[in-house]
Image: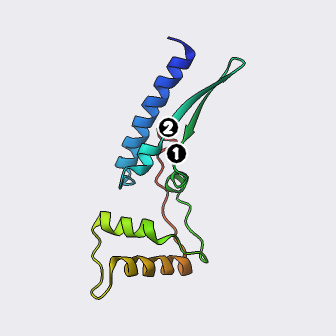
Amino acid sequence: MTIEEALVRLGDELKVTMTEQLKKNGSYYTGDLAKSIEYEVRVQNFDYQLVRTMLTYGIFVDQGDGRRPGTPPPVKPLIDWIKFKKIPVPQGMSVESFAFAIAKKIGKQGTNPRPRPFIAPS
């Protein structure tokens, strides 16, 4: 087995381990983050690198960095989250208006989610 083949195998194992860790720490909702995790082997002059990519918000899940007050988040992901989690919508509101109200409150107060590490533990 070559170094490059070994790194590809390691990348595959890391992806599986990171997905398991996301499930274990309660961060696996739609699976989009887990599906986005990719590894690529880069070789230049006998310098081998295993480079990880994933959706941008993965680092926020891992480190728990919240949104500061001032800018509301986009409403579409909140609508998807409400539907996925089957969160009851208050009477007299649509899912869209409820998501907009949540986004507005986040924009005013920010968020402070706890870290849910999945990168380093893997």
- Amino acid type, mark 2: Glu
Residue at screen point 44% across, 36% down: 15
Residue 118 image offset from top left, x and y in percent: 46, 46
Residue 100 image offset from top left, x and y in percent: 44, 79
Rounded to the nearest angstrom, the CA distance separating label 1 from label 2 is 6 Å
Residue at screen point 27% across, 68% down: 86
Q: Vertically, is 77 above or below 55?
A: below
- In which quadrant of the rendered view does residue 93 lie? bottom left
Residue at screen point 52% across, 34% down: 39
Circle number at residue 54: 1
Left/right of residue 107 with respect to residue 9 in the rendered view: right
Q: Nearer the viewer, residue 73 or 15?
A: 73
Residue at screen point 56% across, 16% down: 3
Q: Residues within 10 Å of mark 2 (few under 14, many from 20)?
A: some
Q: Vertically, is 45 above or below 71?
A: above
Q: Vertically, is 113 above or below 23?
A: below
Residue 40 image offset from top left, x and y in percent: 55, 31
- Amino acid type, mark 1: Met
Q: Earlier in the sequence, mark 1 or mark 2?
A: 2
Circle number at residue 82: none
Which element is circle 1 on? loop
Circle number at residue 38: 2
Left/right of residue 116 with respect to residue 95 in the rendered view: right
- In which quadrant of the rendered view does residue 51 lie? top right
